[in-house]
Amino acid sequence: MADTFGQAPASRIQADSSRFYAVAVADVAPNTIYCPAFSTSGLFGVAELPIQSGQLGAFSRAGVFAFDYPEGTTEDPAVGTPVYYTPSSATEGALSLASGSIFIGYVVKVPDISGRLCVMIAPDAKVATN
């Protein structure tokens, strides 16, 4: 039997509690939210490394990530504010502090990071019900 330790099948999405593996349908830049089935599921992850289209990549479902502020945000939101994401494709979408199709986590403060929205991905992040 071949050793496949650390490898996920390339033919489907393989997930565990902290990440999932999928073949990217487009180039994915680091620190980008990726939704492989953006119109039908709430599955999302954040690329920690660049992943080329057609390549198998790992997408984190846990951790703290810094994103650009949502459009229209003029001041730092309070710690604990829920953060939502609405994908328009597998690699593009919009963050919101009000509502969205996927609840992704909560605003946190990270020392020495300013001008970015720091989000702790919630372990129970899922499709929003609002």
Image (cartoon, helix red, strand yellow):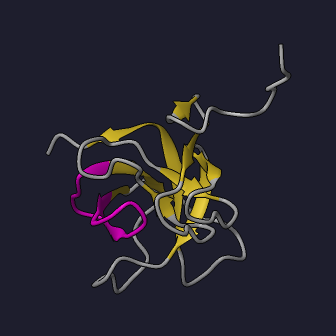
Q: Quadrant of residue 1?
A: top right
Residue depicted at 67% across the width and 67% down the height: 50
Position of 102 with respect to 64 (left or right) is left
Q: Residue furthest left?
A: 130
Q: Residue furthest top?
A: 1
Q: Is 56 above or below relative to 116?
A: above
Residue depicted at 63% across the width and 55% down the height: 55
Q: Is 66 above or below relative to 116?
A: above
Residue depicted at 48% across the width and 61% down the height: 33
Residue toward you, 46 or 98: 46
Query: What is the span of residues highlighted in magenta in the rendered image?
Result: 85-102
Q: Position of residue 28 (x, y in %)?
A: 55, 67
Position of 17 with respect to 33 (left or right) is right
Q: Residue furthest front?
A: 1
Q: Quadrant of residue 128?
A: top left
Q: Is residue 99 magenta?
A: yes
Q: How many marks?
A: 0
Residue toward you, 16 or 14: 14
Quadrant assignment for the C terminus: top left
Position of 63 with respect to 87 (left or right) is right
Residue toward you, 13 or 33: 13
Q: Position of residue 62 (x, y in %)?
A: 59, 43
Q: Quadrant of residue 40?
A: top left
Q: Is 4 above or below relative to 86?
A: above
Q: Is residue 40 magenta?
A: no
Residue toward you, 34 or 3: 3
Q: Position of residue 23 (x, y in %)?
A: 55, 49
